Amino acid sequence: MDMNTIRQMVAQDSIIDDTELDTESLKIPQLHSKYLNIYSDEKLELLRMETELRVLKRKKWEYYTGKMSKEDLDDNGWEPFQLKVLKQDLDLYLESDKDLIRMSALIAYQKEKVDYIESFLKALNNRNWIIRNAIDFLKFKNGIV
């Protein structure tokens, strides 16, 4: 699920109809379940991506140190690395590797989605208080204290 879709869903589900506060209160568990499922799926995807990054880092380490086998090079579609990299320079090569940068960017995007959904779940937890305050205000406004 992409970030724009999540934002649109949150924007739609954030609206509280102040003429139907009872119905809005009853929708909270459904919304919580919906976003908890999305959060769980996105969090698992993040964990999968982080694992994939660790494996890719090891492969790139083997690649840049010249320890990768011919079969592994062929499996990954990589040409043998021609330079001899010194141990102190290895981080420079790993940090500037396009595949690692791309994977890190995908993980950052995924983390942003997870954080965004998590913050909406926290807001949903406060929705009962918001609705209660709205009801109390309506009572006060109508002279029912």
Image: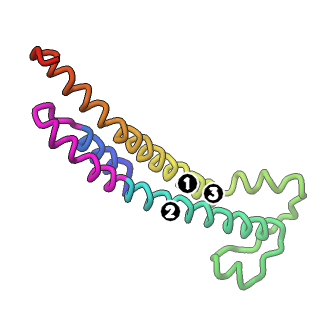
Q: Main secondary structure of the magenta part?
A: helix
- Residue 80 belongs to magenta span: no
Query: Extreme front residue here?
Result: 145
Q: Tell me whether circle 3 and circle 1 mark residues in contact (CB < 8 Å).
A: no
- Mark 2, other Cα within 10 Å: few <14 / some 14–19 / many ≥20: few
Give above or below for 22 relative to 137.
below
Q: Which mark is residue 44?
A: 2
- In this figure, which residue is indicated by the disc labeled 1? 107
User: What separation in Å lies between label 2 and label 1 (alpha carbons)?
Assistant: 12 Å
Whole-Å distance between the Cαs marked 3 and 1?
14 Å
Name the amino acid, label 3: Lys
Q: Is residue 142 left or right of residue 118?
A: left
- Residues packed near mark 1 inside 10 Å, few (<14), some (14 to 19) or many (20 plus): some
Residue at numbered disc 3: 98
Which stretch is magenta?
Answer: 15-35
Left or right of residue 85: residue 94: left
Point out residue 39 in the picture as x, y percentages from the top left corner: 42, 54
Type of amino acid at the residue the image marks with label 1: Ile
Asked which quadrant contains residue 12, the reply is top left
Foreground: disc 2 or disc 1 = 2
Earlier-in-chain disc, 3 versus 1:
3
